[in-house]
């Protein structure tokens, strides 16, 4: 297995030790003073790529920090591991798999070798099948069992088989011709599917069942409910072929479910669920926006892959974002990381990236299974920034914890409503400035005095109005949120996650932490039936909760 070789714990690396000592000095400094001291700060700590500006100058870092962070990347052999990932080595060691979502968007003509096999023909074949299906459905050529065209698509899947397509279709809605109405069902709470089905006609709906394993309980339950709803009206199993398609690695189970062979889209075990929107899991994206738009998304991601592969580390956006994140979390001790898009099209981006980062890097043992003595993924959370300003920004500005944030905005809005975008962007620029600069007591006093407030009253409230600032942010500016820039943005974060996982020496591509709860739920489920007893071996809390639930249900 690829990671089982000996490795140096990051805390033993000279660069880590240097960074730890350096952090003690820098903690006494203020970012605004670093700007005063260095006219070239923005130029030094920003990167301009085609379609993306990354400004990381509003972080508490200097030239010395940057050099030491780059040394950390070198000493951690980020470049070597990057080469291994792109070469299809089994870097997902606990599952003994390659990690090759990059293959899905590789626009070169070169062979892509995984386990001794060129997978390019298989990838291209699936893309071509996606293109054809998309064309047929969108053009009206694909007819339902009563000869009507498809008007609605219901995508059933959860986690990695849901969040990506949902985020992208919602985000790029401005590019949709609205020929098909999209619906997403992920929750096993029947409320969601019931509400979706209530407004649909079985004759004009296409269900896309997306599940890499085709065993996920939530997805299978929703798929069965959809099938039953459909059969009540259609009454013919043959009709299913015109209304159900599936995306999975598990053809056997999909066929057993009753979905026609020709309606099964393949994916592969070397694509992790949370990195799978580039595969046929992205079918709802293509159906909603057209295959060409999906292809643009792939193109954008491919361009970021090429940048990640080829740019020197100090000019490499994913690498620099990863290093700045590590600096903030491991050396300055900040416990979380906010994602704050100032573009409605990125509404779901924080939720999507929350899964990508926290499921990948929320681990507490290293490659050798030893307990980490340092933090891995910080808490990743966020919300559209302008809404956040009226909700949780209070804590970002004045709370006891410092929460570094990524501000993501665009030069042009996808829908130009006069005057709105500049108002939005004025807030975008102002908030990261405010977080960095803050406002001290003397400034507050001056402002309140100018407003005519009596001195005694000023002294009562001055400390409450002080913003200490020194709160780090990155700013990412896109020309606009279109398929290509969104593809690049997602890939940027994917590679950031990869780099951080390598430096932390953790397995980023497994997710064993989601298993235990599933196993326990399977044991509890039969206990919820009235005729069955609650397991007396449960802890007292769980036992009482289940008993309370069962009793209340029978009232
Ligand atoms: C992603 C995770 C997880 C997964 C879902 C759905 O990396 O593994 O979110 O995508 O549990 O799994 P299936 O696609 O197998 O239904």
Image (cartoon, rainbow, N blue to C red):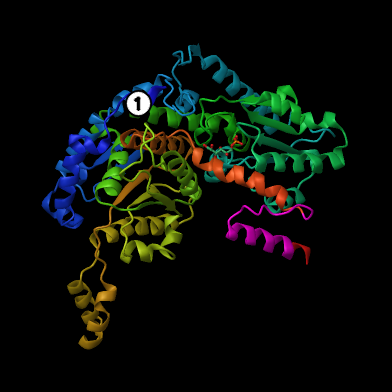
Q: Could you tell whether 174 is left or right of 400 in the image?
A: right
Q: Residue at x 22, y 80 (%)?
A: 450
Q: From the top left corner, tell me how far across and down residue 3 is, in percent.
A: 37, 26
Q: From the top left corner, tell me how far across and down residue 146 is, in percent.
A: 85, 34
- Return the residue nearer the eye: 421 or 16: 16
Where's the N terminus, which quadrant?
Answer: top left
- Residue 259 appearing in the image: no
User: What is the number of callouts on the image?
Assistant: 1
Residue at mark 1: C-beta within 8 A of ligand 1: no
Where's the C terminus, which quadrant?
Answer: bottom right
Q: Residue at x 34, y 41 (%)?
A: 372
Rendered position, 11 above or below 529: above
Query: In this view, which residue lies farthest toward the right?
Result: 235
Rendered position, 437 above or below 463: above
Dividing the image into four quarters, tell me where ligand 1 lies.
top right
Q: Could you say which quadrant of the image residue 449 lies in?
A: bottom left
Residue 69 magenta: no
Crowd tier of the residue under label 1, counting other residues whose Cα lies within 10 Å: few below 14, some 14–19, many 20 or above? some
Q: Could you tell whether 255 is left or right of 481 in the image?
A: right
Residue topped by disc 1:
82
Q: Residue at x 35, y 26 (%)?
A: 82
Q: From the top left corner, tell me how far across and down residue 433 is, in percent.
A: 27, 58
Q: Which residues are magenta?
A: 530-552
- Residue 187 appearing in the image: yes
Residue 532 magenta: yes
Q: Could you tell whether 410 is left or right of 189 in the image?
A: left
Query: In this view, which residue lies farthest toward the left?
Result: 37
Element under disc 1: helix
């Amino acid at each position: 297995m690829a990671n089982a070789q000996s490795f140096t714990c990051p805390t033993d690396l000279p660069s880590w030790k240097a960074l730890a000592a350096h952090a003690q000095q820098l903690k006494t400094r203020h970012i605004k003073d670093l700007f005063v001291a260095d006219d070239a700060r923005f130029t030094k700590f920003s990167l301009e790529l085609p379609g993306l500006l990354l400004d990381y100058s509003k972080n508490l870092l200097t030239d010395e920090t940057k050099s030491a962070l780059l040394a950390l990347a070198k000493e951690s052999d980020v470049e070597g591991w990057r080469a291994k990932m792109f070469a299809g080595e089994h870097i997902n060691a606990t599952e003994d798999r390659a990690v090759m979502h990059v293959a899905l968007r590789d626009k070169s003509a070169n062979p892509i070798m995984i386990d001794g096999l060129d997978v390019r023909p298989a990838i291209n074949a699936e893309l071509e099948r996606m293109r054809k299906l998309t064309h047929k459905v969108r053009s009206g050529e694909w007819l339902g069992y009563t000869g009507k065209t498809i008007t609605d698509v219901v995508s059933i899947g959860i986690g990695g088989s849901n969040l990506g397509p949902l985020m992208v279709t919602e985000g790029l809605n401005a590019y949709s011709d609205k020929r098909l109405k999209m619906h997403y069902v992920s929750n096993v709470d029947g409320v969601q599917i019931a509400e979706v089905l209530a407004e649909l006609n079985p004759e004009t709906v296409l269900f896309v069942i997306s599940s890499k394993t085709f065993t996920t309980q939530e997805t299978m339950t929703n798929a069965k409910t959809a099938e039953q709803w459909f059969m009540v009206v259609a009454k013919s199993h043959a009709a299913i072929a015109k209304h159900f398609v599936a995306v999975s690695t598990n053809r056997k189970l999909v066929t057993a479910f009753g979905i026609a062979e020709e309606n099964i889209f393949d994916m592969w075990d070397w694509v992790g669920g949370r990195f799978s929107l580039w595969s046929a899991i992205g079918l709802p994206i293509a159906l909603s926006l057209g295959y060409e738009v999906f292809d643009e998304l792939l193109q954008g991601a491919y361009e970021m892959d090429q940048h990640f592969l080829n740019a020197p580390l100090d000019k490499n956006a994913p690498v620099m974002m990863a290093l700045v994140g590590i600096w903030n979390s491991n050396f300055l001790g900040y416990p979380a990381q906010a994602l704050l898009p100032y573009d409605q099209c990125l509404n779901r981006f924080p939720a999507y990236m929350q899964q990508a980062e926290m499921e990948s890097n929320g681990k507490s043992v290293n490659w050798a299974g030893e307990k980490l003595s340092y933090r891995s993924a910080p808490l990743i959370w966020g919300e559209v920034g302008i809404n956040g300003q009226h909700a949780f920004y209070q804590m970002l500005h004045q709370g006891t914890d410092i929460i570094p944030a990524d501000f993501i905005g665009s030069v042009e809005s996808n829908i130009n409503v006069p005057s709105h975008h500049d108002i939005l962007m004025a807030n975008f620029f102002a908030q990261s400035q405010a977080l960095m600069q803050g406002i001290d007591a003397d400034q507050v006093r001056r402002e309140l005095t100018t407003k005519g407030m009596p001195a005694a009253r000023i002294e009562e409230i001055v400390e409450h109005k002080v913003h200490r600032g020194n709160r780090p942010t990155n700013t990412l500016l896109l020309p606009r949120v279109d398929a290509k820039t969104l593809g690049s943005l997602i890939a940027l974060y994917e590679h950031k996650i990869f780099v951080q996982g390598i430096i932390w020496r953790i397995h980023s591509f497994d997710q064993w932490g989601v298993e235990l709860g599933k196993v326990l739920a399977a044991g509890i489920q039969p206990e919820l039936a009235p005729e069955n007893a609650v397991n007396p071996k449960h802890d007292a809390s769980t036992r009482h909760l289940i008993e309370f639930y069962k009793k209340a249900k029978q009232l």
